[in-house]
Image (cartoon, rainbow, N blue to C red):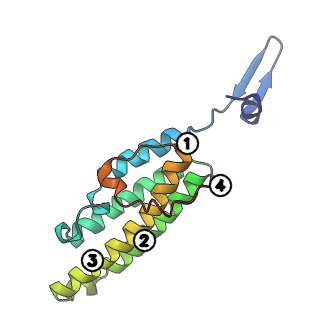
Amino acid sequence: MKFDRILKNITGLSCPIFGIQWTAPVDEVKLAEQFVIFLEDKRVLFNPSHMEDSGHCVSSVNCIRNEITSTLQQVNSKSPLSKSLRRMRSASLVFQNAISPNSFSTLEEPIQNSILERELFKLREKFGLSLGEITVAYGVDVQDALATIIPFNCVKYT
């Protein structure tokens, strides 16, 4: 760790002999890696849409949203990780709002399937872009199944 980064994290000094208190910065690379590993197990992000059930999708997206919020509480609000996580959380809310309403369950099955497919596409598109940004910014590896949602020709280098 560089001196100026250490200096920013010092919270106090003490004497007569010597003492120092400081707060270690949260390792965002580690948090990014842990979050990507968490997403690798969420099939709602990459399974073929015909294999998905709307109730399970909403539940899974809620679980993802909770993990995003938990991770956001540990990162600097101006970091690239924070910005990507906030976009993912916003996309999660949009998905849940589209699929969760009581009116969704009253629709005929072909219409439900069509709406679910469309909303999964939009969710995966947003997650893929944000996931691509995280992998580039933090050098995180992604399992092949999850990597299918990353639009490799559209990843921004932030």
Would you call the spot at circle 1 few (<14 residues within 10 Å), some (14-19), or many (20 or more)? some
Residue 130 in the image, given as x and y percentages of width and height? 49, 60
Q: Nearer the viewer, residue 84 or 54?
A: 84
Name which residue type carries label 1: Glu
Q: Secondary structure at mark 4?
A: loop
Instruction: Give the Cα separation between the discs numbered 1 and 3.
Output: 33 Å
Q: Secondary structure at mark 3?
A: helix
Residue 63 in the image, given as x and y percentages of width and height? 34, 58
Instruction: Give the Cα separation between the discs numbered 1 and 4.
Output: 12 Å
Quarter holding residue 54: bottom left
Looking at the image, residue 125 lies above or below residue 42: below
Which circle marks residue 56 in the picture? none
At 82% from the left edge and 17% from the top edge, which residue is drawn? 15
Would you call the spot at circle 3 few (<14 residues within 10 Å), some (14-19), or many (20 or more)? many
First along the sequence among labels 3 and 4:
4
Residue annotated with mark 2: 93
Name which residue type carries label 4: Lys
Residue annotated with mark 4: 78
Q: Is residue 100 visible?
A: no
Quarter holding residue 148: bottom left
Name which residue type carries label 3: Leu
Which circle marks residue 28 in the picture? 1
First along the sequence among labels 1 and 2:
1
The mark lying in front, picked from 1 and 2, is 1
First along the sequence among labels 1 and 3:
1
At 78% from the left edge and 14% from the top edge, which residue is drawn? 18
First along the sequence among labels 2 and 4:
4
Name which residue type carries label 2: Leu
Residue annotated with mark 3: 116
